[in-house]
Amino acid sequence: MRTQTRGRIALGGPSGSGHTFTALAIAAGLGSSTAVIEAVHGHASQYADFFDFDVCPPLSYCSPESLVAALATCAALGYGTVVIDSFSLFWAGPGGILEQVDDAAKRGSGGGNNAGWKEVRPRERRMLDALFAYPGDVVVTLRSTMEYVLEPDEQGRKHPRRVGGKPVAREGIEYEFNFVASLDTDHTLVVNKALSPGLAGTVVHRPGREFGAQIRAWLDEGAPQSPTEPVASLIARARRPEATFDELGALMRTVRARFLEDVQIADDDGETPIDLGVYITRRGSALQATQAQDNAAYRS
């Protein structure tokens, strides 16, 4: 029997195709609270009058680590949908994968780009794993390379029309998502990939909330998923005074599996910010030290 699934939605298109607007429209149709992880200097904020969403502080340095941390923050705040605009910048933007590969290759003593990829590939994989582990729906926009085709007008004269080419992302990135669509400069969306026969191949001009609601209906088909423990509950477990070393170890494994180490919480003084992973590790180390002291006292 089919189980309900979470949306992993990628929207590609050239400049001017409207993928930011469309991503927000689809997110609105999905029907849950929306956060935008923005790396394009305030583009999403221009649509605040049309859709209800919150914007994470815009990222000017698009490293995979910064995206993992931003996703952890959104999960901790309980957003049901996250829009990443533009995901391409985490590949080819400042601090992105390609820039990190170049930097690693320059630092290395030999091996060129191969050595760079060896260092950076695990960071890229961790970023993708964090994206697909998000406890809600994720919509990403992908920039496309610019291509032009000649189309005849009514008099037979040919004019160039701008269309989108390959997405600016890792080769084969579309295989990672369960819904992939492309937009053209006329704001027409074509569904290139969908695991739903009813949505595959769909063509929609200026898709809006209604199209997002169709995707929601498909995602909700089947048996409910097992509920995910809220981040607030994980934080409460980390703070339990009676937590044992083994319990903290199990908690840390859960936090790592969900890529939540970077969630910021207040330290024991109630004010100083500290990462959840650092907090759990510190508590575990303190318990270990206390246990070692007790064992030494017992032996003496």
Image: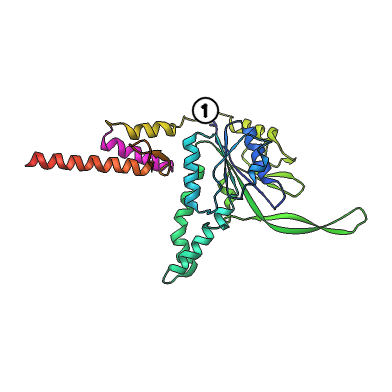
- Near mark 1 (Cα within 10 A), the count class, few <14, some 14-19 or many ≥20, is few
In percent of the image, x 49 and y 60: which residue is there? Answer: 100
Q: Position of residue 35 (x, y in %)?
A: 56, 38
In percent of the image, x 47 and y 62: which residue is there? Answer: 117
Residue at far bottom of view: 110
In percent of the image, x 58 and y 50: which residue is there? Answer: 39
Colour mapping used in the image: rainbow
Q: Position of residue 58 (x, y in %)?
A: 56, 47
Q: Position of residue 160 (x, y in %)?
A: 81, 58
Q: Position of residue 154 (x, y in %)?
A: 91, 53
Q: Secondary structure at mark 1?
A: loop
Residue 134 in view, yes or no: no
Q: Which residues are magenta?
A: 243-259
Quadrant placement of the C terminus:
top left
In percent of the image, x 44 and y 61: which residue is there? Answer: 118
Residue 263 placement, left or right of 32: left
Residue 187 placement, left or right of 35: right
Q: For residue 278, which quarter of the picture?
A: top left
Residue at far left of view: 300
Residue 74 in view, yes or no: yes
User: Is residue 256 or residue 215 the one in the foreground?
Assistant: 256
What residue is pinned by disc 1? 224
Amino acid tagged 1: Pro
In the image, is residue 251 part of the stretch drawn in magenta?
A: yes
Residue at far top of view: 223
Q: For residue 214, which quarter of the picture?
A: top right
User: Is residue 69 or residue 140 the one in the foreground?
Assistant: 69
